[in-house]
Amino acid sequence: MRVVGFTLVRNEEDVIEASIRHNLRSLDALCVVDHGSDDATPEILAALVREGLPIDVRRDDSIELRQGAVTTAGARRIFADGADLCIPIDADEFLRMPSRERFEAIVSAADPARHLVMPWLTYLPALDAPGDIVARLRRARRKADERHGLYKVIVRRSFLDTPDARIDVGNHRVRAEDATAGVAHEALPGEIAALAHVPIRSVGQFTAKIAVGCLALRLADEGTNGLSFHWHEEFDALVAGRPLTNERLKAIAANYSIGAELRVDPAKVMWSEDPFLHDIALRYTPSRPPNPLARILTFGERVAAEVARTTGGL
Amino acid sequence: MTGGSAAGARRKPKVWSVSMVRNEADIVEAFVRHNCTVLDGMAIIDHGSIDATLPILTALAREGLPVILIRSATPGYLQEQITTATARDVFRQTGADFVLPLDADEFLKVRSRDEFDRALRAVPPAMNGLLHWLTYVPDYATAPQGTIALLRSARRMATERQVFPKALMSRYLLERPEAMLANGNHYVARRLGGANDDAEPHARIRAEFAALAHVPIRSAAQFVTKVAVKKLGRIAARYDWKPDAASQVAYEAVVANRPVDDAVLLESAINWSVPKPDWIAPADAVLVDDPFLAPITLRYTPSAAADPMALVLAATDRLVQRLVAARRSATAIAPVP
């Protein structure tokens, strides 16, 4: 069984090397689409390719974020190249697959007509801890009671038989072209496969992520984008002059991807020890802190250039 | 200067200003209170501020200061067009003899209104005026004491190293329907984008009678916001800075995350509007005491400039909205294949 990951990444220099090295312990290969990164992400990816890791890196220089469309196209390409399973994995997600053999056995025994899903587990690293990202990820703790009710999809090769189907925004499931028509999925137990999600790693990283991510989503002009509501909320807070703090990050992590009506007091959220990271060492990840203003300005320059081209500068 | 004058030989000239401002909360109150001590009125266009600029201007107008406040949601840069059009309106509606385009960091420097009036009366009828543009460099250590302390600490460059004057539009503008302020308000061009060597006629006004004190750099937050937001606007307007422009150098430092401390502010202020190859070290700059600020006190100015991140993000979001609207519009009028 050939299992290939797909990662769409933009400006994740702090974590991309760690996630690729980790995830390749469970995958046969990884296809990475670099969506216009202007930090060190492209150099890190190139170095990993030179090192001989089984990754296929492509560049997408569109400004707007169309995650669902790009991931769907990427998955189809992966299947055309012979994969049996495609696992979309964001740069801040780490596969927890204790045994590839057991994983394959469970997948083989499951209904072949159904795509699969696995648990999506929110982790919060030690924000104040010293050391590199690996040190902080090792001390990350899992939210004890996951309340978002979301899974992450594992797409079967049968995806090729449904040319109108697509992977939805957020990679939570496969959807039919007719959104009212259900597509059945089979859930894998967390001890077979799960995704550890570390969306929040530092003030600078998360500021850049929500700022540029939210702008790119708005540029796509596709209406409400699934679960990106928390990005828009934090974006609006930044514009209102309320910068992020470590305390705010902890509160966001406690209710990440959870609608306003289901949120709880962050102080009451329990975090448990449940390590996920393989024994990896980094070679290319910069030690400097992220520079969110630079990321916003570089993105803004591209938007401004597009405005000039579209409007003639008027 | 001989012959008749733009303002007539005896009548006291009526002088207004026109300004286009955005996110100038740290300075706008001082700007208005000071310039109102000299001018007959100020027309101020708020071009989408998201900081406290608009509430401050509104409060000043409510106080009874002679301020006409205009809100503009016009997308894009278009500063020359909007400012010139507003100046024409001011001439027509107020009967002004002169309209002075002012940025929010510019303070009219006169010894007295009488001397200013005499200089204005000397401007020939079919000419505009040109004012000296004087660079002032504050003592950044005074910043914690507030805007007034900072402005009072500012000293003038003994020898001006940039070469730009600032235009003063005369009523003659109404007879020249195609005339347009040049970018930066440095002269009145014959038409939009017109060259300096083919500009409308100007008469220089001696600095001892009237000049503009310019305080372009006041704090790290204000400086970062200024260069970042202007850069994006200029790219969108196809009017980007040249690679060696002082603003471009400052912008690259911001993107490179170089710390903006008092030393950086000082070097940038001394060399503002000077191409990078011609910069001098702060130690080589000679500053002189030449106070310009009227005796004013502030009531509404916040204690610190707004967070650059918030203002840059808002500016970028505005560009995104503009691009989305332009694309929708293009789609709506696309020909049917």
Image (cartoon, coloured by chain):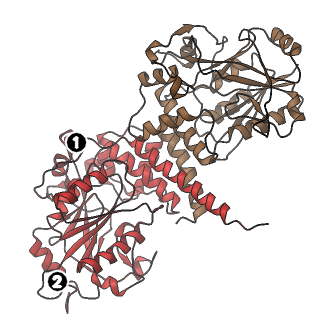
Chain where mark 1 sits: B
Give the side of residue A109 with respect to residue B57, left or right: right
Q: Identify the amino acid type marked 1.
A: Ala
The quadrant where residue A193 appears: top right
Against B9, residue A51 (above or below) is above
Give the side of residue B288 with respect to residue A65, left or right: left
Q: Identify the amino acid type marked 2.
A: Arg
Image point (18%, 77%), residue name: B14
Provide the residue designation for mark 2: B121
Q: Residues within 10 Å of mark 1 (few under 14, many from 20)?
A: some
Chain corresponding to brown in the figure: A
Provide the residue designation for mark 1: B143
The answer to whether residue B169 of the structure is visible from this angle is no
Residue occupying the far bottom of the picture: B3
Q: Are marks 1 and 2 on the same chain?
A: yes
Find the distance from the CA under tag 1 to the CA under tag 2: 39 Å
Residue B309 placed where, x, y %?
A: 42, 41
Chain corresponding to red in the figure: B
Q: Secondary structure at mark 1?
A: helix
> Mark 1 vs mark 2: which is more N-terminal?
2
The quadrant where residue A19 appears: top right
